Each structure stands twice: as structure tokens, then as C-alpha cells.
Image (tube, rainbow, N blue to C red):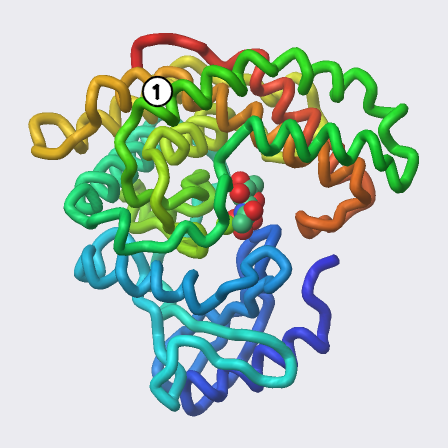
Amino acid sequence: MLPGDGAVEDARRAAGRFAVGVEAVRSFGGGHINETFLAATAAGDLVVQRLNLSVFPDPVAVTANIVAVHRHLAGACMPEPVPALDGGWLLRDGSGVWRAWRRVPGAAPVGLSTPGVARAAGRLLGEFHHRLAGLDPAALTETLPGFHDPGRRLAALRAAVAADPLRRAAGVAAEIARAEAGAPLVILAADLSARVRRRVCHYDAKLDNVLFAGATAVCLVDFDTVMPGAWFWDVGDLLRSAASTAAEDDPDPRRAVADPALYRAVLDGYHEAQEGRPDGPTPAEREAVGYAGALVTYEQAVRFLTDWIEGDVYYRTSRPEQNLDRARAQFRLLASMPLSRIG
Ligand code: GN1
Ligand code: MG
């Protein structure tokens, strides 16, 4: 369900604890997890979010990660978190746990990938990684352990199929078979994960989480999942989302295909930003990037399929078969994703 009027009223009350002079408040953005609102205030526009505590059970650790990254980046590549008027980063009231960001002026996600968009987003991600190379991953908490781990996601799918609470499994036998056929990707992901460096990552680096001002990629947003991990998952998420012009839940089978020019543009931008800079990707990290688009697309397909079988309990949906469409679109996209040794 999308946030309703009651939620907007909750957001208005919460916004008043982050800034004075709250005017219009409305639902904002397209996230599947938290509820996000835009509040016009006397101090400018704030993005106010109610955290989904069943996904993020430790909002204090999530916030500490965000603040550590923001400090290290000195504000580059990300929006500015805004403390509540009482000085805390998080506000707890009767309606939930809230936090706020300053809205990045004149910037918004792009609807459609183009080679220019894909390259600019890749360059921004490369810049983000470059700037984070000096931040010790041990300074951050792994808030969602095993978040990018196709083996864990495939095991969760198998458990969902076994429980089959809504008797949906029989209707998606073909998709379950595709998930099982992808088991070699699970082995590949585990092998690459064991060989790459531990880094500070964004972990939800999809194109929707890149803000553009005109042709310039200005910053990333949605920092709930910044945590220690492996960079290639970020590149994979950008490939998954920027190498295709299809929506993530596109029901049209003709659209969910990777376009080689878009795919190449993401990688060119990413490598361009890191070329010749110290502490850049190691050979193992570069190798992993060559598989990352397929690995993340597979993992995401499995996650959407699991949620469909479990009865749409994790991802917010705005229509009945959305998770099924999401899973199918990701499996179609996977079929066209290059699997190469050349990152
Ligand atoms: C979720 O918060 P949102 O909608 O940007 C999810 C990501 C998925 C993404 C798919 C914490 O992100 O892992 O890639 O949906 N975030 C979490 O669009 O599960
Ligand atoms: Mg997210």
C-alpha cells in the first residue's frame, strides 16, 4: 500500500520536530521499504522518512553508518542529514521512528536511462567509491548481515516455496526453475566475495537512487544500507537498473533487456572516475565487476519471487501482481546480462 492521509499527517507532525514553519507535506519518491515525504518548511524543503523497523531493526546503527559516511565524504556525493530540533538524528514519536534530509535543490532521479545518463551515474558511483576507499569498513556496522548474498536469498526462496502460505508456488513453477537454474551464480558470487577487498558500500546503488541536475549526476540518495561489504554489488545494482530502459516491474517482455551501449556506458563511467587514483579496485574487484550485473539481477529476481510467494510482505506494492511482474522482469533482464571476465 502507498502511504495514505493518516501517514501524511504523521509526517507533518514529525516534520515539525525537525524544522519550524512546516507548510505543505506530501508523499515523495518511489522507495519500496521506508515511507518518504517532502515537507516545505521555513528552513527550506526537507525529505522526511519513517523507517521501516521490520527491515531495519537497528535504526541507531543505520544512522551511525550514515553519519560516519557523511563526515568522511565532507558532504560530497550525498545529501545532508538534518538533526531534529532537539539535536538527535532520530525522532521517536507515537507513530514511529523518523529522520530528515535537506532536499537537494534542483535535482531528481531520471525516468529513463540513456548512454549519457548511464555514464554519468557510473562516474558518480566511481567517485563515491574512490572517496570512500580511505574509510575503514570496520568503522561501520553490517546492519543487515548477508544483505547481498544470493546463496542466502536462494535458501529463503526454497523455504518460501516449502511453506507456500498462499498457494502461489504452483503458478510460478517456471520462475522457481529459473531461480534453481541460476545456482552456479550463487557459487560464483561466493567465490568473488571471498576474494575481493572489504569496502564501505552503498548497497542500493540503483539508478533511481541517483539524483541528476540536467545531465549531471549530482549525488546518491537512500543511504540506509551503507555498510561494509564489496563494491561490485553497487556496480551490479547500477548495471541492473541503468543498462535497461525497462521499469523494474515492467510487464512488457520486450523491454526488460540489457542494452550493450548502456551497459558499457555504466562501466566506462565507473572506471573513468577511478582511473589512476590510489586505492582503486584491485584485480579481483575488477574481475567481479564483469559479473556484477548478472549477479545482482539474479539476486533481485530471487528476492522479488520470494516476496510474491510469501504474500508481498517485504516490498511495498501498489498493485496486486507487482512483485510477480518485478520477478519476471528481473529474470528476463538476467537472460540478456553479459557474464564476462572483462569489467
Ligand atoms: C529496496 O528502499 P528501496 O526501495 O530503494 C531494497 C533493495 C532493492 C530495491 C529494489 C533494504 O530498496 O535492496 O534492491 O528495493 N532495499 C532493502 O528496487 O531491501
Ligand atoms: Mg533502499
- Neighbours of disc 1 within 10 Å: few (<14), some (14-19), many (20+): many
Q: In this view of the protein, can residue 326 be seen by the observer?
A: no
Residue 142: % across, % down: 41, 50
> Front-most of 13 and 191?
191
Question: Which residue is located at x 86 percent, y 35 percent?
Answer: 164
- Quadrant housing residue 223: bottom left
Work out which quarter of the rendered image holds the N terminus and state it: bottom right
User: Is 265 located above or below residue 300 in the figure?
Assistant: above
The spot of residue 255 in percent (x, y) is 61, 21
- Which of the image's four quarters has the C terminus? top left
Q: Please tell me which residue is depicted at 59% across the width and 56% down the height of the picture.
A: 55
The part of the image, by quadrant, that contains residue 338 is top left
Residue 186 visible in the current orientation:
yes
Total marks shown come to 1
- The x and y percentages for residue 246 are 57, 28
6 or 54, nearer to the observer: 54
Of 16 and 174, which appears nearest the observer?
174
Above/below status of 308 relative to 38: above
Q: Disc 1 on helix, strand or loop?
A: helix
- Where residue 271 sits, quadrant-wise, is top left
Q: Which residue is mark 1?
A: 288
Is residue 90 shown left or right of residue 11? left
Instruction: Please indicate whether residue 334 sits to the left or right of residue 304 in the image.
Output: left
Q: Amino acid at mark 1?
A: Ala
From the Cβ of disc 1, is ligand 1 less than 8 Å away? Answer: no
Q: Residue at x 80, y 36 (%)?
A: 309
Task: Give the residue displayed 59% in from the left and 66% down from the top.
Answer: 27
Specify the quarter for ligand 1: top right
Q: Position of residue 168 (x, y in %)?
A: 88, 33
